[in-house]
Structure formats: structure tokens, C-alpha cells
Amino acid sequence: MLKTMLTAVLAVTLVGSAHAEILPLPAEGETFWGLGNTGILCDADPCPRHGVFPIFRDGTRGRPLSSFDKPEPPLLRADDVIRSRIETAFDEDRCVVAEGHYDGEILVVRRLLGDCLPVFDAELSRPWPGRFR
């Protein structure tokens, strides 16, 4: 009986934590963006290996804004420290989470929240107009 109860509690905990919100609410008018490595691997180009993509509050990644690889950061309006961290993430094939919004083609970054969560295979199984490895 105790074993069954513990198993049920563990199952509920795991299911509930799969949708846990790990990011705070963004400021009004702002969105969380992943900048850098998208976690997508393809067999053929075009392939968005690097770029800008939405990050949801549970840490999962949305589709990149471009289906092409963008190895350089987008046009940015950010202070020098934030700009440097974003450029370093692109240079080192990493990803950072930024809070900001687009003003035309310029990403206005309000703040950085840290590194992106690791990508899990389930995230990459979503349909993409390319072939994955």
C-alpha cells in the first residue's frame, strides 16, 4: 500500500514538474527570446542552427524566426555588458535567454536571464521544413 502511494505521488510530481514555470513573468510588452544555438541539427540546409527564437516560461523553445542559420547576433539595442554576453554566446555556440521586444528589425534587450536550458529530443521532434539528424 505504501509503495503504491509513493509511486502515485512520484508520478504526479513528475507530471506536474514537466510544465513548471521556471521563468518569471516578462514585463508588459516584453517577450523572452533565446539567442544563439537553437538546438536544431539538420542533414540539409537551410537549417536554423543559430538564431533568435521565443522561449516559453517553462523553458521550452519555439520555432526560430528564420529557417536559415544566423551565426551572428541580430541587430541589438542593449547596454555593452548585455551585448557582449550575447555576442559571446553566438561565438561559443551557446544560447542565452533575453527579455525584450522588437522595434522594427532591432531587438531591444531589457535584461538577460541566463543560459538556455538544454534541449531534449522531444523538443526537436516537432515538424520542421528540413531534415533532422
Image (spheres, rainbow, N blue to C red):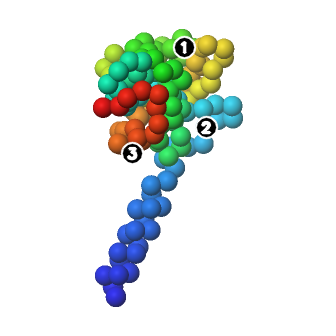
Q: Which of marks 1 and 3 is nearer the N terminus?
A: 1
Q: Which residue is drawn at 51% across and 20% down?
A: 66
Name above or below for residue 90 compared with residue 120: above
Q: Which amino acid does label 1 sit on?
A: Leu
x then y, percent, for residue 4: 35, 81
Count neighbours of disc 2 (C-alpha within 10 A) and say few if under 14, some if 14 to 19, many if 20 or more: few
Count neighbours of disc 1 (C-alpha within 10 A) and say few if under 14, some if 14 to 19, many if 20 or more: some
Q: Which residue is drawn at 45% across and 55% down?
A: 18
Name the residue tied to disc 3: 122
SS category of the residue bearing label 2: loop
Give the residue furthest to the right. Answer: 28
Camera-side residue of 67 and 82: 67
Q: Which residue is drawn at 51% across and 14% down?
A: 74
Name the residue tied to disc 2: 26
Residue 14, picture quadrant: bottom left
Q: Which amino acid does label 2 sit on?
A: Pro
Camera-side residue of 36 and 63: 63
x then y, percent, for residue 71: 40, 14
Of discs 1 and 3, which sits in the foreground? Answer: 3
Name the residue tied to disc 1: 76
Q: Earlier in the sequence, mark 2 or mark 3?
A: 2
- Quadrant placement of the C terminus: top left
Q: Residue 121 carries which label?
A: none
Q: Which amino acid does label 3 sit on?
A: Ala
